[in-house]
Image: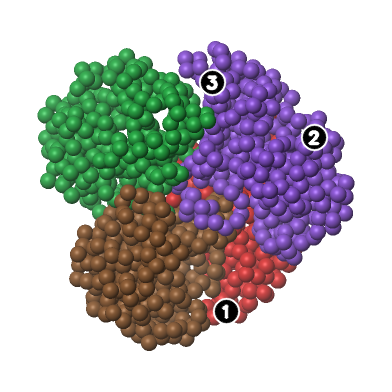
Chain colours: A green, B purple, C red, D brown
Amino acid sequence: MVKAGIYGASGYTGQELLRILLRHPDVEVAAVTSRRFKGLPVSDVYPCFEGLTEKKFMDSSPDEVASVCDVIFSALPHGVAMDFVPQLLKSGKKVIDLSADFRLRELSVYEKCYRSHSSPQLLEEAVYGIPELYREKIKSAQLIANPGCYPTSIILGLAPLLKSGLADTSSIIADSKSGVSGAGREPKIGSLFCEVDEGFKAYGVLVHRHTPEIEQELSFLAGTGMKITFVPHLLPVNRGILSTIYAGMKKDTSASELLDIYNDFYKNEAFVKVLKSGFYPNISSVKGTNNCQIGIAADPDMKRIVIVSAIDNLVKGAAGQAVQNMNLMLGLEEGAGLKNIALFP
Amino acid sequence: MVKAGIYGASGYTGQELLRILLRHPDVEVAAVTSRRFKGLPVSDVYPCFEGLTEKKFMDSSPDEVASVCDVIFSALPHGVAMDFVPQLLKSGKKVIDLSADFRLRELSVYEKCYRSHSSPQLLEEAVYGIPELYREKIKSAQLIANPGCYPTSIILGLAPLLKSGLADTSSIIADSKSGVSGAGREPKIGSLFCEVDEGFKAYGVLVHRHTPEIEQELSFLAGTGMKITFVPHLLPVNRGILSTIYAGMKKDTSASELLDIYNDFYKNEAFVKVLKSGFYPNISSVKGTNNCQIGIAADPDMKRIVIVSAIDNLVKGAAGQAVQNMNLMLGLEEGAGLKNIALFP
Amino acid sequence: MVKAGIYGASGYTGQELLRILLRHPDVEVAAVTSRRFKGLPVSDVYPCFEGLTEKKFMDSSPDEVASVCDVIFSALPHGVAMDFVPQLLKSGKKVIDLSADFRLRELSVYEKCYRSHSSPQLLEEAVYGIPELYREKIKSAQLIANPGCYPTSIILGLAPLLKSGLADTSSIIADSKSGVSGAGREPKIGSLFCEVDEGFKAYGVLVHRHTPEIEQELSFLAGTGMKITFVPHLLPVNRGILSTIYAGMKKDTSASELLDIYNDFYKNEAFVKVLKSGFYPNISSVKGTNNCQIGIAADPDMKRIVIVSAIDNLVKGAAGQAVQNMNLMLGLEEGAGLKNIALFP
Amino acid sequence: MVKAGIYGASGYTGQELLRILLRHPDVEVAAVTSRRFKGLPVSDVYPCFEGLTEKKFMDSSPDEVASVCDVIFSALPHGVAMDFVPQLLKSGKKVIDLSADFRLRELSVYEKCYRSHSSPQLLEEAVYGIPELYREKIKSAQLIANPGCYPTSIILGLAPLLKSGLADTSSIIADSKSGVSGAGREPKIGSLFCEVDEGFKAYGVLVHRHTPEIEQELSFLAGTGMKITFVPHLLPVNRGILSTIYAGMKKDTSASELLDIYNDFYKNEAFVKVLKSGFYPNISSVKGTNNCQIGIAADPDMKRIVIVSAIDNLVKGAAGQAVQNMNLMLGLEEGAGLKNIALFP
């Protein structure tokens, strides 16, 4: 059995990792840490674990955690992870970091969006953890920069199109909508039930910090530097991201040609489902799963393509993709622990 | 006191009209009809009216209703209204029709999207009821084609921009999100609580019937025939439409120039609020009101403009705008009966 | 025009008072205070007020507010109001306090549930502000202790029954369910969207601080000291309280006898609606209104009565009832400013 | 591998069975039937199954289904199941019926609540499928009457108390709250999103059809005929039932004595979790699982006990308990396929 640890486990992503790992056939959870809740049973902080685990949150040092684990997930916030990840790596153990700290190749871009970086030497080493694009590099990585939730939904939605060369790369717009768990469990007015329920709004319009991460990866796919227009919105649901992506056509292309391209691109992927013509995803169909569903439309008159992509922000957008990465890094079956079907309704 | 009737009053729009008209200072509700619920007190069908009105649904003929009313709102479905509106008009009374039956100038466009039309002679006479654009024509109209909810949100969001000539008219994308009340009160699986709650999806992608209505009005504003890419989505909320609209710039334009243009265009409008720079609307801020809130961003690098527009689909998108039209037609104060503040939270 | 002030206006109850008072036909809002948001336009803190008021939050002293107002609403928290209310009263102005600080007749009971009291001399003077029970005293009061939301729903639900002497006063159980706005706008984990949405729980089981307030008023009604079993629950909705109340019968009583008693008791009350046999209220029917709806069932075999009572916690349970009290205190029409119909859906 | 069939699989309970069985380690799904959707892939009707199963709904006869299955789940409606279950049994295969048709021991009680019964001879044979109470009989049963959702929550909540003899059996009140999936997938106005969202109501007050089923089982537990007061309510959530149960004490009993009794009663049960003193369940903690969480309070002054019990109505209240019964009937591990942790948030 693989021994796994979760460093900074008391947020929504941390407990999601725990939920997946406790039911993973090849993993034993060796440590879960939280400074705020140290000493408390996980089930006191998240009552859904009542009777299902005896684990308690510990306030252990990176060294202590690394010493008892084969792989460590860091679910610390941006700007904090950069200080702990080097210590976790020191021991030679594999690390999957769910913060933004190691996702950007360019130090200057990171420092402009976030803050000064204490471990820039790791930026080059870290592998951006989208298995559908970087599977081989992930297998041999020691440090994974696990992608952001918005980026995952947009990159998976656009990868086949950008690779095909059929899109006008200056024309891309991503109109994304996310559930509230993306904002984390910190108590703030904007995340209160009464502020979100029965509401819907755009936020971070044209200035969201995920934009450079998205642009970096889309540029790799397109083989040329490119920028996008990205507008995120806040949905009154717990989980899920749906991105509606608009692209101009370079030349006349039909929906069925696009479906062929997408089906071919993802034909060996267990977690990406391309829907048949006329069908579009609903976030309720991927809730709680590591699946991404994609629907495609084309308007030859307007020379425009519409791609709709849905994931669960906490699973394929965070903890699930992290476990998929772990499986690859450790030579386990890629889908192990990630086969549940979305709970509906 | 003006005597008003509501023909086909048992749907969500019909009861919303009743809610507004019962508290309108210059109106007395003379008749509310429903074939399905005839004889029942309104408060049995909508318990929020309990103790607040003694009105019952009647199954009266158009003639009977017209004979006791100065103005009649038709809240019948598309394809049904066309048969009743001519009878209501015959009496010389003013009619505000909330269906799509008289909104399209071109008979062929209507018949392609909906069905064959039984009263095409009225298409030319009907005035499209957006007061912010057609106030003078509305004042003297006998028949108002009350706009659709998606079209209202998009047309109000784009009118100043298209009039300014600063937008590339071939570039417009409207990514709209609507609450469930837009689907009406007919029992169907897709509108069930369990199908919608915790979900979010696109539907009618590139094929929604509101598209020609939107394109007709945008073309008038732009002074040239134009098409758009329109993708509606279903939000798990009762009320509200938020449209995120993307437009290419013809030349470099800043957000502050755009704000000036919008503020100037709407400076005398009581129901359209242009938000200051960096602020974007939330549908919870307009819920239950006739207000439209608009936020604007610009990205000179990408030469792209983002406009976010929010209304309540049942009020500014239907019943409230209908009452605003009635006020104009009858020489009442334009805002009478429409001054409530959004209930929050 | 009456000049009204709201002291501590930035919480949900404070902004609800503002919403009502801005549309009250006989009132001008002279001051709204908030220490936290001083200097900010109300519409920056609550965007639903955008374009509808120019008011800003001020950080004024009680004296300053009292000097420009005829009546002051205090929406300060429990334990804070007790320090400010005496200063507001000093000026001779009328004060309506929405905290718990002046609701309990017995100082010792207050101090056991809350904290030591800095102004116990006012406990006797304060009038408990349920107009349906204490209308005449309210008219001449200088200080109103505005009732709690749970107490209002339970007291209105039980008043006719207790007055009738038909209930076993040792048998009363109130199973109450409240929307989240009852918890206020303070950011805390338990009020986050993700903690509440799709959930439902009991809390404060048998130990909620509203219990003594409820028991005090029920004892007055019953003419004898009595206790109840009170269990509150948290509903995933913004607004509304529904209390399902169980009482043992002293002797055989039918639902229709009970309906007669309730209809008679409330026959002159504009804001209490007793539903006909077989009908029970839904909180969505009273949302945003000052109305209370009551449904009644009886089971003679089990000798048990069931009463279901619904209010909006922020209106009849707080701000609306406060305005009703103000209307009475100032000789205005009791229902002025409180006649809207619940927004549905 | 056990071959299982689902007869009448297109409702919410049917698809929940399919979700569980497709991931059950010892089961192969051999047939899923639906008259309405015959020929359609399950994933067209429930898109959460997209890419996860190739199953199609068939319109097969009971004989055809029985011939390819070892065990058949009937998820047909009340009144329909009674006609099909005898045909399914004929083949000698085991049947688990999720309707109410075989739950009541007394034919006359069934016929009063539902309709005339076409297969009364099976009432005696059928075993009421609560494993925590009837495990041994279930192991050897050929026909299981799978319990209702409300009854499961109330029976599990009361079993230890009634067995202990400490409760006044004439005093029991169950105030239950259910999510909307309990109403099924039939399109009806009362289940529409807009009718339920932001609302909460009691329904079926004192007349709900689950009452006799509850009373039958409680009487067995108490060893004496007993009746209860049962009031169900509709919660604006997809899943979950929380029952708040009130009982009078026969003699002074503390919460800790009760906790001991409950912990002892359920000490070997994997799916019932008794919470520690002062903790009460939230339906979000059991959502999507076969778990029941129970919290207990006592008020010696009022001589009253409060028990709060939470389950997922579609799992422990239907499909999950059915699979638990199947596991017992077929000698599989009782918890096989039922070990997931509640998705939160």
Q: Which of D45 and D323 is in front in this view?
A: D45
Frontmost residue, A30 versus A153: A153
The image position of residue B60, as x and y in percent, is 80, 60
The disc placed on residue C300 is 1
Q: Pointer 1 and pointer 3: residues touching (CB < 8 Å)?
A: no
Where is residue D319 shown, x and y percent of the image? 35, 64
Q: In this view, does B301 lie above or below A32?
A: above
Per the image, label 1 sits on a secondary structure element best described as: loop
- Decide: is C35 above or below C276: above
Residue marked by disc 3: B248
The label number, if any, that marks residue A117 in the structure image = none
Element at label 2:
helix
Q: Say what amino acid the circle numbered 3 marks.
A: Gly
Q: Which amino acid does label 1 sit on?
A: Pro
Count of numbered labels shown in the rendering: 3
Rendered image quadrant of residue B257: top right
Q: Is D69 located above or below residue A291 in the figure?
A: below
Residue with the mark numbered 2: B138
Spot occupied by residue D235 in the image (x, y as percentages of width and height): 49, 57
Mark nearest the camera among 2 and 3 is 3
Amino acid type assigned to the residue bearing label 2 in the image: Ile
Label 1 vs label 3, nearer the camera:
3
- Residue C145 shown left or right of residue B323 in the figure: left
Cα separation, mark 2 vs mark 1, equals: 62 Å
Q: Mark 3 lies on which chain?
A: B
Task: Look at the image and tell me whether residue B206 can be seen.
Answer: yes
Q: Say which of B78 and C239 sits in front.
A: B78
Disc 2 with disc 1 on a shared chain: no
Question: Residue C184's x, y, as percent?
Answer: 52, 41
Q: Residue at x 80, y 32 (%)?
A: B137
Secondary structure of the residue carrying tag 3 is strand
Q: Mark 1 lies on which chain?
A: C
